[in-house]
Amino acid sequence: MEDLTIQYVNLEQSENQKSHRTEGFSSSKALVVRRGAPFRVSLQLQGRAFNPQTDTLMIRVLLGRLYVTMPVTFSKKVSPSSWRAYFNPEGLNPQSPSIFICTPASASVGTYKLQLYVLSQSGQKRFAIGHFVLLCNPWCREDAVFVPFEDQREEYVQNDSGLLYMGTSVNHVSRPWSFDQYEADVLETCLNLLQVSPQHTRSRRRDYIKRGDPIYISRVVSAMINCEDDCGVLKGNWSGDFKQGVNPSMWTGSGDILRQWARSGFSPVKYGQCWVFAAIMCTVMRVLGIPCRVVTNFNSAHDTNGNLVIEEYYSEMGKKLHQSKDSIWNFHVWVECWMTRRDLGSGMDGWQVLDPTPQERSRGVFCCGPAPVKAIRDRRIDLVYDIPFVYAEVNADVHTIVVRQGRVLSHSTDTERVGSLICTKAIGFPRLRNITADYKHIKSPNPSLRSRSSTMSEDSTLRRGSSQGVSVSLALDKAPVAGEPVLFTVKVINKEPVAKVIKEHLNAQAKEYNHSPSDTFWEAHSIITLAPMEAKVLHYQIAPAQYEGVVGDDLVNLAVVLEDEASQDRVLVSEEFNIASPQITIQIAAEDSITPQKEHTALVTFTNPFSMPVSGVLTVAGAGLIQGKVQFRLLPLRSGERVQQNITFIPKMVGMKMLQASLSLANINSIIRGFKMVSVSNA
């Protein structure tokens, strides 16, 4: 009898990736599918046709040296827990049979080899028929990363752009970021990240077996984003000196970083800070099929001694001092991944905190999580992983101490400042979503613009005497914007039936989000007279020429110290805020009719709000819209002058895309940004 011979095999990449919602990975040479769902392979036979009476087909899939072999049956009945292969249930074409391969919903993530064995009366033959990449499947109910709502799957798995929230809770800033998961080489680099991890190099077999578990995958990835224990992706740098690499504020997307890491032979990319670490991890997790979102915690505590107390020191003139190892970052960025926690019970399913920024070791390695958000809210510090550390980040108390020559002048406690706002990007819209209540039990509503206040009393100071005193509050009149004065109000109330003379000291210092402030750049001092029980409202402003050096990523620590001349009691109130950078605007012609594979035009506009001329480099990028990046050199632009630039782009596929522009100024330490969401639809 004539041999049964395979002429060629078609992995039906276009059809399979469409049904598996992986068509965005079209640049990959390998077939990309999701576990727990069947994919089709078509055979073309040479010579005689397939005879089910005398011939048997066997499929073998291999992950490293692990493999499973399964017969191709005529039964479509499959199990979510086992590998199965079956002929097209619509009917067998003997000359060109179609085979469906169904993977378990808990199968390991990775790149598999696919082999076909033909058993006939003339013997056995083996054919290598290609490779396929297997990812987690949030659409599959049996998968541990299953998400029940389509809009969440679109946002947290398929969306290749997003917003990272920075600044302060008083004046938060949304920074556009391109996750780039569908860009060339990004999928392959994310898979290589698993391959070069210490877990894989120590025991390939054990690593492959455990890769079915998103808990395991997420801890591996969390450690591999930073390079402290391995050949991870990013080197952190908070020194302010970035001469050996790239200033973290310059990055606009994940693709450049991941490709540079891969091209260098997996040498760490320089440099990253928390939002870059988190954004890269979000890209990797979305590529692997695990729902992920970037989360910002404003006023994030780093409690070095674990007592849930952060101490901050000020001079009697309102200057913040660097006297404590504890710190509060104005913001800290991590990610949440969605998964079931079979190791902890169903009550801990859902969003899990993972933090790839190297701060503390977890079981000997710089990684953090997955820590269930529900466990953080309920203070379940007895559970894994790293819940006490994350709990402190959102719940520590702040003790503020005014000192002079080592002597404590006053002391107050704030129980609401840490974790004052925890947020992420809203589903389907470019706006903030407040998720603070997911992490902690909220005592009272927390408006985005709130005043800070303090009171001289026996509870909040170490003074002797009456429990009645002076109270002070500080409030920004509006969110500060570059080019406009910073306007704020100080309200002082005499709570005693005697007149008072008060010395007032105001102090503004520039600071980075994770450091104590630097030198004072603005101050004011005055004498306030208060009649018995009188309240006074005082208005102040800081002119643009006085603060222009702190526009952009830098922040401002503003403090007010009041001193009662008679009793020498002191009270302090402070606020930290950012001065929002000017915006680049992007307008798109006929934006309601953007279609794939057609050229469209955008107009990018910037107006100089600074008091001095500025120059720099304008960069425009857009995953799925522009190949690479487009750059223009901006000639000196006088104060108030406007520049416009036309950009052409050709969308590759249907969906919501982001066009973003950034202007790196040469003479001011600031990067100006802007973005425009682009809806690409079929004609």
Image: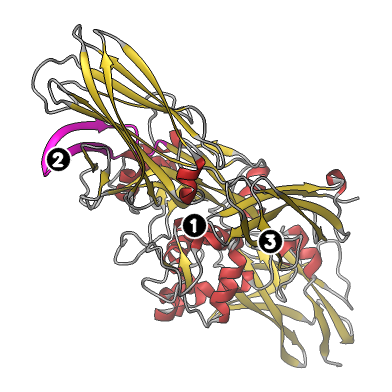
**Residues marked 1 and 2 touching at CB (< 8 Å):** no
Q: Residue furthest left?
A: 464
CA separation in Å, label 3 and label 1: 31 Å
Q: Position of residue 408 (x, y in %)?
A: 12, 37
Snapshot colouring:
secondary structure
3D distance between C-alphas at marks 2 and 3:
49 Å
The answer to whether residue 340 of the structure is visible from this angle is: no
Quick check: can you spot residue 566? yes
Q: Which residues are magenta?
A: 396-420
Residue 404: give its label. 2
| Label 2 environment density (alpha carbons within 10 Å; few <14, some 14–19, many ≥20) | few
Residue 301 percent coordinates (x, y): 32, 46
Q: Which residue is mark 3?
A: 634
Q: Quarter of the image for the N terminus: give it.
A: bottom right
Residue 617, position as x, y percentages in the image: 65, 63
Which one is closest to the eye, mark 1 or mark 2?
2
Q: Nearer the viewer, residue 463 or 232?
A: 463
Judged left or right of residue 470, residue 556 is: right
Mark 2, secondary structure of its residue: strand
**Which amino acid lies under the numbered mark 2 shown in the image of this protein?**
Arg
Q: Residue at x 48, y 78 (%)?
A: 196
- The amino acid at mark 3 is Leu
Q: Residues within 10 Å of mark 3 (few under 14, many from 20)?
A: some
**First along the sequence among labels 1 and 2:** 1
In percent of the image, x 62 and y 50: which residue is there?
A: 162
Q: Which of the pair 151/533 is nearer the observer?
A: 533
Is residue 77 positioned above or below 141 on the image?
Answer: below
Of labels 3 and 1, the one closer to you:
3
Tell whether position 407 is magenta. Answer: yes
**Residue 278 numbered mark, or none:** 1
Q: Secondary structure at mark 1?
A: helix
Q: As drawn, is 287 to the left or to the right of 230?
A: right
